[in-house]
Amino acid sequence: MNKQNQKLTFDNGIDYVKYLRRVENFAEPVLFTSFFSLEEILQKPNTQILTAIGHHFLQLPYSNEDFEKITAQLKPLNEIQLSDIKINFCQLRSSVREGFHIFKGRLREIKGYSLPFQEKLDLFNEEFTKYELELKRDVGQYPEILTEYKRIIALFNPQDILTMERIESVQEENFVCFLPADSDSSDAIEKHDYSWKILFLDDKPSELESVFEILKEREIQYEVATSCADAKTVIENDIYNQIAVVVSDYRLFEKPEKENIKPRMQNEQGYDFLIWLSKQNRHNAMVALSGLSKWFLLDSFRKNRINVKVYSKSGLLGGGAKLFVDDIEYLGTQFNEVLNNQPKAALWNENAVCR
């Protein structure tokens, strides 16, 4: 670890391993040991990482034979395994989201049973109670989540037991949005030196303040344009392709001259800009961020054969802004790395061979 992170302290080995996985990208296998049994440890909040691939557990005291047998089975994580553990086990938000996803899977399983109505209803109620206990164990300090869970279960209609669309349509974000923004990490995450930037095209950039605040915290540079003309100027001046991600609204409106007057659409729209951008000799990710239906946006860009990632502005509420920035940060880093690994034209000219 770097010198900055050596000063960090942890209350237990579980938090330390979560830090190593999430922040330091540590992929080596981990063997947990304790005088408590594994069952006792798993009763405590947010300990699911112990059961994830790449970890094992020995209860103290243990014999050398036990140690050698277990360690022989442990192997370093590949990139997908490490990513899976980081996302689903090393952050409280992800843990809550994954838990509710699993809970809905159990409900779907019960739904498919060929049982009498009352027996199936008893199984549902048993799962409701069981999951509520899991929530109290993991996030009991956030009563808003338990209140939201009870609201969701109130949607369940026992007379309509074969259709559970109302519960299934509830997103895991319903719970996550009640967690404070810093609940994912109690330790300082290493800052990066970002050499790339983001361009935002939006007629109401004030709606993106939550995103801008997180970008500033991470010291990620960005520029904002409110019209296609301004955005094109930024791109044309970006001769070194420093802008690695472009985030554009779908529809752009002019600012009304007077209040209570319905604004007119701008002559060029966000989708016009993305279509134009796709034809430029550039290397950057393109993102559509709009309040319109995600399926409408996907269909629109698919028809034009443009590779655009689609996000909803409604998803920025609660903890959504952080998740959105996480994705944008990943995109920017990936596109910038690919660009930096391209051979420079000057080198090609120097090494050119005439035939």
Image (tube, grey):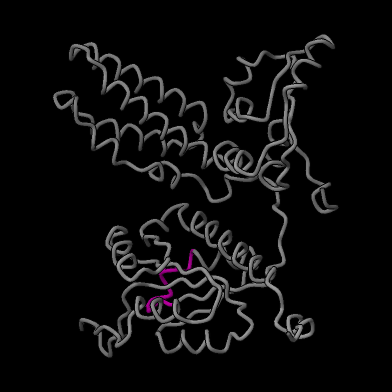
As for residue 9 lying within the magenta part, the answer is no
Relative to the observer, which residue lies in front, 45 or 336? 336
Give the residue at x 40% y 67%: 288
- Please identify the quarter of the rendering in which residue 133 is found: top left
As for residue 206 lying within the magenta part, the answer is yes
Residue 309 percent coordinates (x, y): 43, 62
Residue 327 percent coordinates (x, y): 52, 57
Highlighted range, magenta: 201-210
| Quadrant for the C terminus in the image | bottom right
Image height check: is 197 above or below 78? below
Is 43 left, or right, of 276 in this rendering? right
Q: Is residue 12 something that shows in the picture?
A: no
Image height check: is 338 above or below 281? above
Give the residue at x 37% y 29%: 105
Give the residue at x 35% y 34%: 149
Relative to the observer, which residue lies in front, 267 or 72? 72
